[in-house]
Image (cartoon, grey):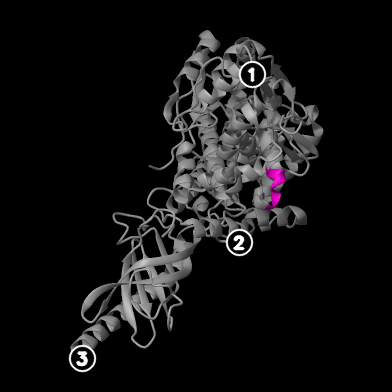
Amino acid sequence: MSYAPQSQEWRSDRALLLVHGVGNAAPGDYRILHERIREILGDSAKDFAIYQLYYDSINDWFTEKTELRERIDSMLGIVSEGVPRGTIGDLLSEFIGDVLWPVLSQAARTAVREAYLAQLKQIVLDGIASGHRPKRQKLSIVCHSLGCFHTYEALHAAASDPSHGLQPATHGVRFKNVVYMASPVQLIRSVASRISGLVPSHRMATLDPEGLRLPGEDALGMRIESVDNWISITGSLDPIGGFFLRRKAQWAYMAVTGQLSIVDPQDGLVHDDEELRVVFAKSLENQERPPEVEDKNPHSWVGYVVRHAPSLKAWMTA
Amino acid sequence: MRTAHIVNGRIQRIATAFVLALLAFVATIGSTSRASAADSNGSNGTSTSGSGTNGHGDEYTVADLTGTLATAALESDFASANPTLSDTLAFYLRRLDEGGVGDLTLKQLAGEVQAVDWRSRLRWRQDDYRAPFALRTEPAALEDVVRKILLTVNLPGGLDDHLVDTVGPERAAELLDPVVQYHEELLHLSLAESLEKLRRYQIKYGPGSARLNVAETFLSYGSQWIPGFGPNQNGWPGPFEWVLGYNSTLVTTQDEELTLTSAAQIGIRRYVWSPRWPGITNLIRPRSIAVGGLVAGEKNGPFIWPGRGDSRYGGFLVWGPIQFAYLGGDDPTVAIAHTIQLIPGLF
C-alpha cells in the first residue's frame, strides 16, 4: 500500500506531530500516548490537530529486500567495541542494530525523511485549508528515541531545501516547539563518525562537520531558525539519551547550542541496577511491536510525557 | 537426433528473435521514462506536470500578486516601519513586473519555481542578478526573485508582521491571500513530488521488488555512491541495481527433453518508474527489467560449476518474473527461468 500522510481539519491554529521511536508501529499504536497527551492538554486538546508519523512500513521495505538489519546486527561486535557492556551495552547493541542500518543505507534514510517531509507539507496545507497561513500556524513536534533522529534530519532538510516549501524565512514555516525525548542524535553521530567511511553521508545533517545545530535558513544577511523552543529531555538512567548509569556521556548526549536541556533524575524508577537490567530486557522482548511503555522503563515515552505534563502543556499552549 | 537439432534450432531462432526484440524494447524504455518522469540526475519532472495540485493558485496571476503586495506596502506605510525590507520588496516587485511574467497564474509560477533544481539554483545565486528579461526564460532567476519577495513578507518584522500590527489580522489576511495561494500551490507540487519519490522507493524496495542475495546486498551498499544506483542529491532513488548470482534453475532443452542448467550471472537491473508500467501483472508490465551476461559450465545440469570444462558464455534478460537466457558454445541453446529465490538470501 502506498504511503499517504495523515490529513485532518484544524480546529484552531495549532497542530502537534508525534513521532515515535524504534518499534514496528502501525496506525493505531501509541494510543496510550495519544490519550495521555490529550489528558495533559485538557480543555485545550480540542484546539489541536494531532498527527502521528508512522514510518515503520517504509523501514520494512528495506529490511525485507536486503535483510540488511540482520547482517548489520551480526557485525555489532565490531561496531560496539569500546561501548559499555553489560546492562547498558545490551540495550545499546539492540538499539544500534535498529538505527545503524538506516544510517548505512542512504535509500532507507532518504525514504523515511521524504515521508516525514510529506507529512509536514500536509500539516501546513491542512492549516492553510482551515484558514491559517503558514506564518501564523503554531506547530509543535514531540518525538522520541529514533524519531528524534528522523526529526533532526527532516527539519534540517526542510530548512535548507527551498523545494520543500517549508523554509522558516522564505516560507514562514516555523515550529513553536520541538521536544526531543531521549534523543540519540549525538549517539548516532558518534557511532557513525567511527565508521565514517562506511556511511553515505551526503545531506546527512547529523554528520555535519560543523556539529549539531538548530535548523535554519540564511537570508538577506540574517539566520532565521526554524524552531522557537528546542527542548531536549532525557533521563539519568537512559543510555539512548546519553546517560550511562547516572553519568552523562558527552559522546552520546545531544547538546545543541540554544536548546533547553532537561535531565530527569530517574533513580526513583528502579531500586537498583539489577531491576534496571530486568526492565530493559523486558522492553526488548518483542521486537515486532512498539516497546512496552511501562512507567518503570527509563526510556519510556509515556514516562517522559507524564513527568513533564505541566511543562508540555505550558509549551504547547503558549 | 537430427530432428532434435532442427527443433532445437527453431526454438533458438524464435527465442533469439524474441530476446532481441525485448532488448530493443528495453533500450527504448530509458527514453520514455526520462520523458515521462524525473530521471536519476536530479530533474524533477513531476513538479511541472501539474498533477496532484489542489490549490487555488489559478485564481490569481503574478500581476495580482505584485499589485496586491504593492498595495499592502503602501496601505500600511511599510517604508516608514522597515525601510530596508520595503526597498527590497519594491525592487523585486519591479523586477517581477518588468520580467514579462505578469500573465502567469500563481499555479504556473509555482510550477516554474518548483522545477528549478539545486544546481541551477546554486549557479544562479552565485551569478547574482542579470537582466530582468531572463525571468521568462530562466526559472532559476524567477525563483530567486520570488524568494526575495517572500522573504520581505515572512521575515520577522517583515510585511506580514507589519500588516497585522497596522491594518489588523483580517485585512492582513486579505492582502496576503495571493502570497498564501502561491505557497499553497508550491506545497501541493512539493507534496506530489515527495509522494512520487516514495512511490519509486516502493517500486524499488517495497513488496514485489526483486529480493537481493547476500552478494547483491553488499554490492548495492557499495554502489550507493555511484550515480544512478543510490539516491541523488534531490532524494530521488536511483533506477539501477546490480544483478549478481548463481542461477541453477534455468530450464532448457537437450535431446528433445527439458533439463536444468546452471550459470553464474552479472548484470544490471533497471526499475521502471513510469506509472503505466507496474500494473495489472508483473509479467505484462514488469516493475523492473534486467540485462547482463552469464557463464555456464560445459554441460547442462543443476549445480554445475561455471568453470567446469569449456565454459559457455551468453546473455540474459529478465522481464519481471521471467528470465530468458542464451548460452553460446558448440551447441548454442536458450533457457528460461523464474526469478524467485529458491533459498532466500542466497540464490
Against B25, residue B77 (above or below) is: above
Give whichever of B118, A307 is nearer the camera.
A307
Q: Residue at x 22, y 88 (%)?
A: B6
Farthest residue to the left: give it.
Answer: B3
Indicate the quadrant where residue B61 lies. top right
Report helix, strand or loop for mark 3: helix
Residue A116 can be seen in this image: yes
Q: Amino acid at mark 1?
A: Asp
Farthest residue to the bottom: give it.
Answer: B2
Residue B211: give x, y in percent of width and height.
Answer: 42, 54
- Residue that label 2 marks: B226
Task: Please state if B97 lies on the left or on the right of B22 as rendered.
Answer: right
Give whichever of A224, B125 is nearer the camera.
A224
- Residue that label 3 marks: B2
Foreground mark, 2 or 3, reads 3
Q: Amino acid at mark 2?
A: Ile
Against B13, residue B118 (above or below) is: above
Give whichever of A110, A82 is nearer the camera.
A82
Whether tag 2 and tag 3 are in contact, CB under 8 A, the answer is no
- Residue that label 1 marks: A273
Report helix, strand or loop for mark 2: loop
User: What's the distance in space between the residues labelled 1 and 2, CA to CA?
Assistant: 48 Å
Residue A243: give x, y in percent of width and height.
Answer: 70, 25
Q: From which residue to which does the magenta span run?
A: A192-197
Give whichever of B183, B46 is nearer the camera.
B46
Residue A13 can be seen in this image: no
